RNA sequence: GGGAGCAUAGCUCAGCUGGUUCAGAGCAGCUGCCUUACAAGCAGCGGGUCCGCGGUUCGAAUCCGUGUGCUCCCA
C-alpha cells in the first residue's frame, strides 16, 4: 500500500473511533476478570473542555487503556454535571438576549423546559471533544447529574441525612451572590487582596459630643444597631450607657463594650452591623442587638435602609460618601489593604447575609473520611503533597450550606404547611401521609389537603449531587447492592485537579463511606494546573486558553496527547506551549516514516540467512541487542506507570522509539544500496515495532493502531487497543548463549565508539562521503569482531584493522580504553588533535587524584559500603589504563 | 497571620532510599549534511558556584538549620 509522505491524522482518527465503537471494545459488562473502573470527573454540561480537562482526560485514558491491555475489565464512565449556578446563569442570559424573556416571567416548569432544551443543544459539545481526544469511555454508560435516577438518588440521600439528623434548616450568616441571587458555600468564595479605603465617620452622641468610627463600608451605616468599644479603652469608658445617632438617618443606637474590639485598629470604636458582617453578627447575638438588613437580594439597598432605596450597593456607597461629606460627618479617608470575597461563579463581590438555608453537619462524616486517607486506605498521588491540606480541611470542617436559590437542580424535598410546619419527604403524597400520621399520633384534628402543601423552592448545591458520582453512575444509591455496583465499586483511580480536593474529593469519600461502607476509589491522582507559556492561569478572560478541537485539527489528537503529557510532571503545574505539540507531531512523522521504511523492505527482494549465520551471532546481534533493550525499557515503563509517573514513562518510550529503534536499530539492519533484505531482520523489525506501538498505545492510540494494521495483515478483531501485553522477560534472559545485559553493554560500547569516531571525523572536517580505514588498538578484540561490520557501516569505513601500536599519519582518538586511528585517503595533519588529547589527559589525571585521595582516606575505606570502595578501586584502574592509552597516543603524534 | 511547595543549562523541567546509570532530558543554540524512511529530517558539538550561608557525614544537588526570591492553599 502506498503511504502518504507524512502522517495525516484527520481521517485516521475518524476511522479508528468508528471501528472501536462498532466493535464495542470500550463497553464493559461485569465478567470474571478483575474490574478497573474509572469515573470521569463530570465536566459542566454546557461548557467546553479546556486544557485542564484535556490533561485529566488524557491521564485517565492512558490508565484505562493500559489496564484494558493488561487483563482488566476496564470501565470508564463518562458523563457531565448540571452545574446549577453556571448553567442557570447561561440560560437566563440566553433567554433575555435571544428571546427577550425574563426569568421572573416564567414558571419554574417553563424555565426548566428551556434549561433542558439548552442542555440538549450544548451538552453534546463536551462529549464530542472527549471522543475526538480518543478517550476510550463506555458510551452506554453516559450519566448526567440530572438524570431521573440520579435526581432520585440525590433526594433519597437528602431525606436519609435529614432523618439521621445531619441536615438541618436555619438562619445563619452565609455568603450571598447578588448576581446569581443565591447562597454559596464557603468553598465557592475566592478571596482577593485589594487596596480599599477606611473612612472615619463622626456619630453624634445623645448627651452631646461625638464618637468617631472607622469603616470600609459606609453604605451599611443604615444597618448599624450599635457602636462597640473595648472595655479597657480609657478613651471611651465614660460612655457607658450612652447612645449615639447614625448619621443621615438618625437612628438611636447604644454604645456597647466588648473585648472583641481592637483598640489599636482605626479609632478603636466599631460600628456594629449585624446583618452584613459575620463578626458583627456574632457580636449582635451576644449583646442581643437588632438586625437591620439594608440590602435586597440583588445587592440594591432595601427599604430598611431608608435612603437610596433601590440603588446598587456600590453606587450607594459613592452617594452616601458625598452626603456624609457635605453634612460634615466624613472626617478622613485612608488607604487600607484588605481582602474581599468574590463569587467563584459570577465573579461579583460576595455579600455576607443572614439567611435561612439548609445545612449539612459535616463533623461526623469528616472523621472516617480523614481516617481513610491518613491510614493509607486511599492513596493520594503524587506523594503526600496534599495530605496536609486534606487533613486541615477535615479537622476544621464547617457545616455545608447546601441550598441554592435557583431552579436548575434537585428541588429540596421539604414541604411546608400553611401554618409553617415542615416535613421532609420525596413526594407531596408522602409528605401529606407523614403529616397525617403525625396528627393521628398526637390525637390532633387533621383537615389539611395535599394541595395546601408548598414545596421548598430552592435546589441543592451541585456538589451535593456530584459527591454521589462513583456510586450512582452504577445506580448504587437508587438500587443498593445491585450487580454492577458490587462489581465496579470501589473504583480504581480518580484523576482530578487539586483545586477540587474539598469541593469534591473529600465529600465523595464521605458519601462513599456513608452509603457503601467503603472508599469510593483506591487511588487519587492529582494533576497540576495548566498554565500558559508565561505561567499565567488559563482563563476565558485572558483568552489564553486554546481551543481543543482546533489543536486537534492542527496537530492531531495523538500529538495533543503527547504534547500535554510530555510536559506534565506528576502533580506539578505545566506550562502549556504549542512547541510540545509540534514535538508530538514530529514524533508521529518519525514513526510513520519508520513504517514506510519497513514497508519498502517488504517489497524488496530478501534473503534468508543460513542457520549457521544466525548462530554466528554477528548477524543476529542487532536483533538480540534490541530485544534486550526493549525488555529493559518495558520494565522501566511498567514501574513508572505503576507509580503514576506517566510523563517519565512517555519520555522513555519516546527515546526508545526515536533513538534506539529508529536511529540505531533500523540503521544497523538497513541493507546496503541495491542489496536484498535480511528476512530475519525484517521479521524481527516488524515484531519489535509491533511491541513498540503497543507500549505507546495508551498514550497515542490512533497512530499506533494505524501502524499496527499496516505492519502485517490482521484478522478481524485483532486490534491493538485490546491486544494483551506479553509477560516481561527476566532482566537477564539468554539469547544465542549471551545474556541480555551483555548485549546492552556491547550496544553501549558500540554507540559510544560510533559517536566518538563520527566526532573525530567532524573535527577533522572529513566529508561524510569520504571513506576511511579504521585501525583499532584494543585488548578486547572479541567484542569488536561481533560488531565490526556495524561499526564499519556507521562510520563509513571501508575496512577495519586491529593493530597493536599507533598508526602514523592518521587521525587518532581515544574512546574508553580503546585507541582508534582513522586512515584517510589524503593524510591530514590534525593540529587540535594533540590539544584534545592533552585536555582529556589533564581531566583524567585530576580525576585520578580525587579517586586516590578517597581511597587514601582511612575512614572512607573503613566506613563506606564495600561495594562503593570496590567501585572506587575500579575507577582508579580505569583511569590509569585510560591515561596510559592517551599517553601512548600523544607520544605517537 | 497559619500551612504547603518550589529554586538545577538560555527556556521548561527530571534527578525516588546520600556514593559514575550524578550533574541529565526535551526544546532553543552552534557546526556539517538535500546520505536512496523522514529537512516536521540526519550526524556531531557547546552550555550549569545544582539560589546564598552554615551544619551533619569519610562523602551532599540529594539530609538538617537559616536567609533570600517566587507560587499555591487556608483564615
Image (cartoon, coloured by chain):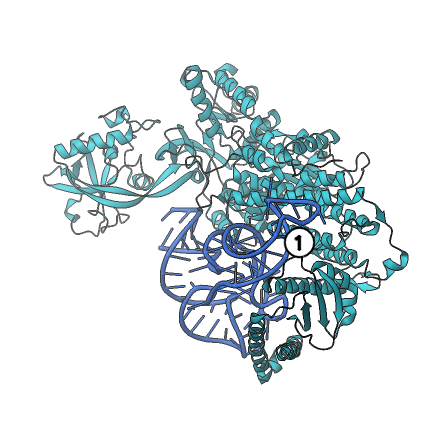
Chain colours: A cyan, B blue
B47 or A424, nearer to the observer:
B47
A778, above or below A399, in the image: below
Q: Nearer the viewer, residue A796 or A843?
A: A796
Q: Provide residue A31's location: percent of width, then percent of height.
A: 77, 38
Residue A138 appears in view:
no
Of residues A485 and A758, the one nearer the viewer is A758
Which residue is depicted at the point 52% across and 51% down? A386
- Report x, y in % for residue A528: 52, 47
Determine the image quadrant of residue A67.
top right
- Residue A540 in view of the camera: yes
Residue B65: % across, % down: 43, 67
**In this rendering, position of residue A256 left or right of residue A516:** left
Outermost residue to the front: A826
Numbered disc total:
1
For the C terminus of chain A, the quadrant is bottom right
Asked which quadrant contains residue A810, the reply is bottom right
Quadrant location of residue A220?
top left
Measured as percent of width and height from the top left, residue A721 is found at: 72, 39
In the image, what residue occupies the spot 52% across and 42% down?
A578
Residue tagged 1:
A659
Q: Kindly give the residue lying farthest to the right in the view shown.
A: A611
| Image-based side of A805 in relation to A859, left or right | right
Amino acid at each position: 500500500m502506498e503511504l502518504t509522505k507524512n502522517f495525516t491524522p484527520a481521517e485516521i482518527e475518524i476511522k479508528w473511533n468508528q471501528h472501536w465503537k462498532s466493535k464495542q471494545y470500550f463497553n464493559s459488562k461485569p465478567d470474571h476478570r478483575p474490574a478497573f473502573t474509572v469515573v470521569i470527573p463530570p465536566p459542566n454540561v454546557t461548557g467546553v473542555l479546556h486544557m485542564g480537562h484535556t490533561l485529566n482526560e488524557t491521564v485517565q485514558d492512558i490508565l484505562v487503556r493500559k489496564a484494558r491491555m493488561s487483563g482488566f475489565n476496564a470501565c470508564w464512565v463518562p458523563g457531565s454535571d448540571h452545574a446549577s449556578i453556571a448553567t442557570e446563569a447561561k440560560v437566563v442570559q440566553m433567554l433575555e438576549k435571544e428571546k427577550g424573556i425574563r426569568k421572573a416571567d416564567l414558571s419554574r416548569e417553563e424555565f426548566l423546559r428551556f434549561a433542558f432544551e439548552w442542555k440538549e443543544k450544548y451538552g453534546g459539545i463536551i462529549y464530542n471533544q472527549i471522543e475526538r481526544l480518543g478517550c476510550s469511555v463506555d458510551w452506554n454508560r453516559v450519566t448526567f447529574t440530572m438524570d431521573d435516577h440520579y435526581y432520585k438518588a440525590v433526594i433519597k440521600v437528602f431525606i436519609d441525612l435529614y432523618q439521621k439528623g445531619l441536615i438541618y434548616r436555619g438562619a445563619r450568616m452565609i455568603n450571598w451572590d447578588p448576581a446569581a441571587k443565591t447562597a454559596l458555600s464557603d468553598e465557592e468564595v475566592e478571596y482577593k487582596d485589594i487596596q480599599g479605603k477606611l473612612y472615619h465617620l463622626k456619630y453624634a452622641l445623645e448627651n452631646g459630643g461625638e464618637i468617631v468610627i472607622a469603616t470600609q463600608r459606609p453604605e451599611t451605616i443604615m444597618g448599624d444597631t450599635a457602636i462597640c468599644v473595648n472595655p479597657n479603652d480609657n478613651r471611651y469608658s465614660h460612655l457607658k450607657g450612652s447612645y449615639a445617632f447614625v448619621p443621615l438617618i438618625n437612628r438611636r443606637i447604644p454604645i456597647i463594650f466588648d473585648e472583641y474590639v481592637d483598640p489599636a485598629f482605626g479609632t478603636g470604636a466599631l460600628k456594629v452591623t449585624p446583618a452584613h458582617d459575620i463578626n458583627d453578627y456574632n457580636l449582635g447575638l451576644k449583646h442581643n442587638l437588632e438586625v437591620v438588613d439594608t440590602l435586597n437580594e440583588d445587592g440594591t439597598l432595601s427599604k430598611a435602609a431608608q435612603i437610596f432605596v433601590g440603588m446598587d450597593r456600590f453606587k450607594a456607597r459613592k452617594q452616601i460618601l458625598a452626603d456624609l461629606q457635605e453634612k460634615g460627618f466624613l472626617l478622613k479617608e485612608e488607604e487600607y489593604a484588605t481582602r474581599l470575597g468574590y463569587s467563584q461563579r459570577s465573579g461579583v463581590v460576595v455579600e455576607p447575609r443572614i439567611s435561612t438555608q439548609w445545612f449539612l453537619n459535616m463533623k461526623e462524616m469528616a472523621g472516617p473520611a480523614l481516617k481513610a486517607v491518613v491510614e493509607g486506605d486511599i492513596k493520594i498521588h503524587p506523594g503526600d503533597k496534599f495530605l496536609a491540606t486534606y487533613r486541615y480541611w477535615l479537622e476544621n470542617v464547617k457545616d455545608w450550606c447546601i441550598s441554592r436559590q435557583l431552579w436548575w437542580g434537585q428541588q429540596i424535598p421539604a414541604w411546608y404547611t400553611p401554618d409553617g410546619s415542615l416535613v421532609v419527604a420525596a413526594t407531596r403524597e408522602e409528605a401529606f401521609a407523614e403529616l397525617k400520621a403525625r396528627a393521628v399520633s398526637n390525637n390532633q384534628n387533621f383537615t389539611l389537603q395535599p394541595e395546601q402543601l408548598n414545596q421548598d423552592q430552592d435546589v441543592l448545591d451541585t456538589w451535593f449531587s456530584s459527591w454521589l458520582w462513583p456510586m450512582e453512575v452504577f445506580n448504587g444509591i437508587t438500587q443498593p447492592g445491585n450487580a454492577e455496583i458490587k462489581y465496579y465499586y470501589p473504583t480504581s483511580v480518580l484523576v482530578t485537579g487539586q483545586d477540587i480536593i474539598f469541593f469534591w474529593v473529600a465529600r465523595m469519600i464521605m458519601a462513599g463511606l456513608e452509603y457503601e461502607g467503603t472508599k469510593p476509589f483506591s487511588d487519587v491522582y492529582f494533576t497540576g494546573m495548566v498554565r500558559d507559556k508565561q505561567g499565567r492561569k488559563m482563563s476565558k478572560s485572558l483568552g489564553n486558553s486554546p481551543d481543543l478541537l482546533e489543536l486537534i485539527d492542527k496537530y492531531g489528537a495523538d500529538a495533543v496527547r503527547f504534547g500535554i503529557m510530555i510536559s506534565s510532571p506528576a502533580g506539578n503545574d505545566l506550562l502549556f506551549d504549542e512547541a510540545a505539540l509540534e514535538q508530538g507531531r514530529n514524533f508521529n512523522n518519525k514513526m510513520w516514516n519508520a513504517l514506510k521504511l519497513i514497508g519498502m523492505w517488504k517489497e524488496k527482494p530478501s534473503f534468508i540467512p543460513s542457520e549457521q549465520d544466525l548462530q554466528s551471532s554477528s548477524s543476529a546481534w542487532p536483533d538480540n541487542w534490541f530485544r534486550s533493550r526493549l525488555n529493559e525499557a518495558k520494565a522501566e515503563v511498567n514501574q513508572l506507570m505503576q507509580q503514576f509517573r506517566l510523563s517519565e514513562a512517555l519520555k522513555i518510550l519516546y527515546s526508545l522509539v526515536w533513538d534506539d529503534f529508529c536511529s540505531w536499530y533500523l540503521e544497523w539492519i538497513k541493507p546496503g544500496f541495491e542489496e536484498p533484505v535480511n528476512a530475519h531482520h525484517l521479521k524481527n523489525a516488524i515484531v519489535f515495532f509491533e511491541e513498540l506501538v503497543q507500549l505507546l498505545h495508551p498514550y497515542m492510540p490512533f497512530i499506533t493502531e494505524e501502524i499496527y494494521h499496516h505492519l502485517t495483515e490482521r484478522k478481524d478483531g485483532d486490534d491493538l487497543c485490546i491486544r494483551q501485553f506479553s509477560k516481561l522477560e527476566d532482566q537477564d534472559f539468554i539469547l544465542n548463549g549471551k545474556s541480555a545485559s551483555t548485549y546492552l553493554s556491547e550496544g553501549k560500547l558500540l554507540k559510544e565508539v560510533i559517536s566518538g569516531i563520527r566526532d573525530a571525523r567532524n573535527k577533522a572536517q572529513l566529508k561524510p562521503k569520504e571513506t576511511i580505514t579504521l585501525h583499532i588498538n584494543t585488548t578486547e578484540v572479541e567484542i569488536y569482531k561481533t560488531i565490526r561490520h556495524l561499526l564499519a557501516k556507521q562510520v563509513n569505513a571501508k575496512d577495519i584493522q586491529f593493530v597493536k601500536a599507533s598508526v602514523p599519519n592518521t587521525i587518532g582518538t581515544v574512546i574508553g580504553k580503546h585507541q582508534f586511528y582513522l586512515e584517510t585517503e589524503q593524510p591530514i595533519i590534525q593540529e587540535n588533535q594533540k590539544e584534545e588529547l592533552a585536555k582529556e589527559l589533564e581531566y583524567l589525571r585530576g580525576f585520578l587524584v580525587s579517586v586516590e585521595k578517597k581511597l587514601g582516606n582511612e575512614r572512607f575505606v573503613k566506613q563506606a559500603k564495600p561495594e562503593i570502595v570496590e567501585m572506587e578501586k575500579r575507577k582508579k584502574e580505569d583511569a590509569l589504563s585510560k591515561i596510559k592509552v592517551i599517553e601512548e597516543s600523544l607520544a605517537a603524534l
